[in-house]
Amino acid sequence: MVEVTGSNPVSPTNPDRSCRGFMLYGSGPLSIMFKNITWLALTNIRRKKTGSVLFFIIAFFISHSLFLIRLSNVYLTLPSFEDIRSFFYAVTISALILCILLLCGLAFLFIKTRSREMGIMRMYGARISDLLFLNTLEVFIISFAGGFFGIFTIILLISARALYIPYFFKNMELPAVLKLIGLGGQTLFLVVIVEVAVSLVLLVFLLLKDIRDLARG
Amino acid sequence: MGIKIIGASKHYSSIHTPEGRVDALTNINLDINEGSSTLLFGPTGSGKTTLICLMGGIIKPSSGEVVLNGIHTTKSGDARVSIFREQNIGYIPQEALLIRDLTVFENILSPNAFYRGSIKELRSNAHFLLERLRLSQKISCMPLELSGGEIKKVMIARALLKNPRYLLADEPVSELDPDSADEALELIYEYHKRGTALVIASHKSLPMKEGSDLYCLDNGRISDYQKGGEP
């Protein structure tokens, strides 16, 4: 038999149960719980590669569509660009709708396959709000990364003049660049909101069913 | 204080029975005191798992009351019961319930991550438990690479990670070979010595500690009860 030793307050090797101050939910700092959940979110993202990559790709394309729509709103305003702008809108809005439909399907599958896992966490005391927070954090990290990468590539294409925006290059000054970055930031915010909202709605829908019974197989 | 079950019944709806429901438990009265040891004994389908789930507040009774340290599961909100479970309950399920995408180590830590204590402390506890259960070599393995017995050991480590006040074990050694079963039970009894109340459900007799309460279940009812210490 292994000898019981140690002084760690939460260690199973410590027989003094009165030391379990950390066990009082809410007694410890919130930042520690946040740190633990962040660790869990990053672990899940790393391990569930397929879901993470698909979410990333969808965020990438949504950010492309949204950013191009916003760019055309700002830089293709002259009447002579009317035809181009209409074509641009048609393509990007179709792509955006397709991406959002794909996102809904993917988020539903992703969450559905995780119902067992959520049931296990519920057995160990995770509240519904904890699960919502964990899921939101995961989707936030992935969509932020995907959206950022998407916007970065568009800006790169514009900088390399592979994507030619006449007005922008005629006024290539610092305010114009800042405006582009500002538009990128707004778009990124929208991408994150769209992805998080879709996954949250579906998760709440799933949690309304009794996940605890799902955990029992 | 403790876990009290007062006249609790649980039924599930079913389209396969004439009554339209299956009575999993009927009129159960049971007390689990802090630091006590209890064996729930009965054949398959007698309601042991349902009773364990009721005790942990994982499911609510259809009628009657389940009181967990003064918290009525039927009247209290989900958050309050969840917090009680998080702070006090360690649960070893009968089925192989591991998260298939996570390693053994992550599986032990992940369900316990929703609390405000340092993850470093949990890590050291996890290492200690894995060493005790002779699973140190499998720390980075995925659940699919484990045998049924090893999965059971991982679930035992996961349940004991936070030194729970109540350990609810549903067939904890059913898939273990005799030596591993003895080791696992020895570890569980060490926790019991330090104050963890044990509730073990089993369809076969187990070497329980002296003074253990014994409840025999049959067809969802307590058919026999033997208080600890009585012959």
Image: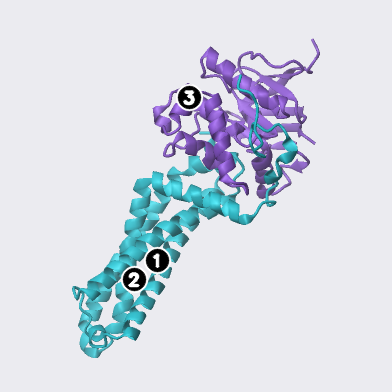
Image coordinates of residue B82 in percent, x first then y, are: 65, 44
Q: Residue at x 32, y 62 (%)?
A: A60
Image coordinates of residue A46 in percent, x first then y, are: 40, 47
B154 vs B85, left or right, is: left
Q: Residue at x 62, y 43 (%)?
A: A125
- Subunit that carries the residue with mark 1: A
Q: As rendered, which of B39 and B50 lies closer to the eye? A: B39
Q: Are marks 2 and 1 in contact (CB under 8 Å)?
A: yes
Q: As rendered, which of A206 and B188 lies closer to the eye? A: B188
Quarter of the image that includes the N terminus of chain B: top right
Q: Secondary structure at mark 2?
A: helix
Chain A: give its colour. cyan
Residue placed under numbered mark 3 in the picture:
B150
Q: N-terminal of the two: label 2 or label 1?
A: 2
Distance from Cα at disc 2 to Cα at disc 3: 50 Å
Chain B: give its colour. purple
B56 vs B123, left or right, is: right
Image coordinates of residue A54 in percent, x first then y, are: 33, 53
- Give above or below for A173 relative to B212: below
Q: Secondary structure at mark 3?
A: helix
- Give above or below for B88 relative to A5: below
Q: Secondary structure at mark 1?
A: helix
